[in-house]
Image (cartoon, helix red, strand yellow):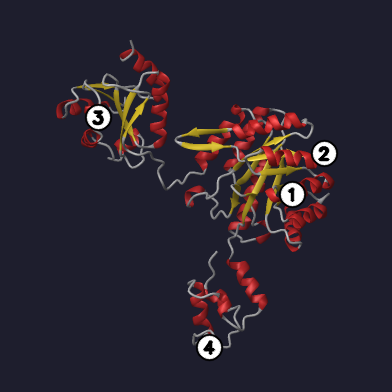
Amino acid sequence: MALTGMQIYKQLPRTNCKKCGFPTCMAFAMQVAAKQKAISDCPDISEEATVALSEQSSPPMKLVKIGSGDTVFETGQETVMYRHEEKFHRKCGLAVKLAANLSIAELESGIDEINSRNFTRVGKEIKVEFCAIDLDGCSNPAERAQTAADKSRLPIILSGEDPLPMSTAAAAIKDKRPLIYRATAANIDDFIKIAADNKLPLAVSAGTLEELADFTLKAKDAGVEDMLLSFKGGNIGEAVRFSTHVRRSALINKFRPFGYPIISEFESDSEEIETVLIAAAAAKYSGIVLIKGREAWQVTPNLTIIQDIYTDPQVPNTVEAKLYEIGSPNENSPVMYTTNFSLTYFSVAGEVERSKIPSYICVVETEGLGVLNSWAGDKISVEKILKALKDQKVAEKVKHRKLIIPGLLPVFKAEIEDLSEWKEVIIGPETAKEIPGFLNRIWGK
């Protein structure tokens, strides 16, 4: 958060000594506020004031980095309560947790599964971000941690509440910079020491918000710089109240003890309910969410939700406006057009691919709007469609002059036929899911 000149001035000696090169301390303070001068350019400023100004000018929520080298996940440093105010800057990370009773062979198999949980949606990769290893009750925590460090292509979370296995595991792979999860009232001193000694990030939990604030201050005083605020339970109402309260305290009230990202874990006997709870946590401020299920059906819905929430609402998600070839189309293949809104394009392209009929898709520039929105906003017209077809040299690709248009825009049919060489305009389906049946019916054998 930027400091005002008056806030900086109050921390200065206010002697107007001119040693900084400015006639008054206020003039110097204004230069610091404008980021033209550093606070250290005042030779007489006290150490206490330097620390205070540094603390006040830092972001209200700390940026926390977990992992090392090429496998680093960043969370925190958010600036708004609501996405529409600006955007959420760092996406929520999904962590799959592996139980402590797994054998080493089962652990390796589970890590391989987690590594493989990445998918492509609307042209972008969505994936699991963490491998979480449960340590409580296992016979050889160092071996389990080292196995995770060797096998996982993702940052690691060491999970447990027993200080002894946690200490052993953390020391074994501290170069991988895992997250220590989680400190509670029963182990807070031991876990703070583990995190401080190994310079690792620490997840902190407590029975009350007051106690949580005490714990984060205690950890910071002991040298733990990177922390996450932990919620664990089975009640989504409690989870939302917790995350909303700490987020508001940090961003709006500038309450520094809560100025850290959130990590959530839910206890549920139902895998379906767990998936729903995690979706709510991802939508309501969690920087990391732990999940036990690692099947694709359990992971994919939440990855999809996270991707949607953490896109920039002020920047349309688009694809390049050009001619796309689905399969290996030839001179007899169907031609269709759609808009450059990425969700529209990939929905159409996916269904065309599913039809098994190679096709050409002409993408028209609509500033990232879908079919109906682009029409309502005057971002698509017959002139733009015909220009796109001409610029992309679509007519040179096929010997026929049949053009499939979206079923939501039948009004363009007659005008396209009248004004262009595309003399047979076919009104396509209104929804993408109807495309395979439609293409097979009109273009199949």
Q: Secondary structure under badge 1?
A: loop
Label 4 or label 2, whichever comes before in sequence order? 4
Q: Which residue is mark 2?
A: 140
Label 2 or label 1, whichever comes before in sequence order? 2
The mark lying in front, picked from 3 and 4, is: 3
In the foreground, 101 or 249: 101
Q: Which residue is mark 4?
A: 18
Label 3 or label 1, whichever comes before in sequence order? 1
- Distance between mark 3 and mark 4 Cα atoms: 72 Å
**How far across and how far down the image is residue 390, in percent?**
21, 34
Q: Secondary structure under badge 2?
A: loop
Amino acid found under the numbered disc labelled 1: Ser
In the foreground, 101 or 18: 101
Q: Residues within 10 Å of mark 3 (few under 14, many from 20)?
A: some
**How far across and how far down the image is residue 149, in percent?**
69, 42
Q: Is residue 283 above or below residue 445?
A: below
Q: Based on the displayed image, in which of its 4 quarters is residue 156 positioned?
A: top right
Amino acid found under the numbered disc labelled 4: Lys
Label 2 or label 3, whichever comes before in sequence order? 2
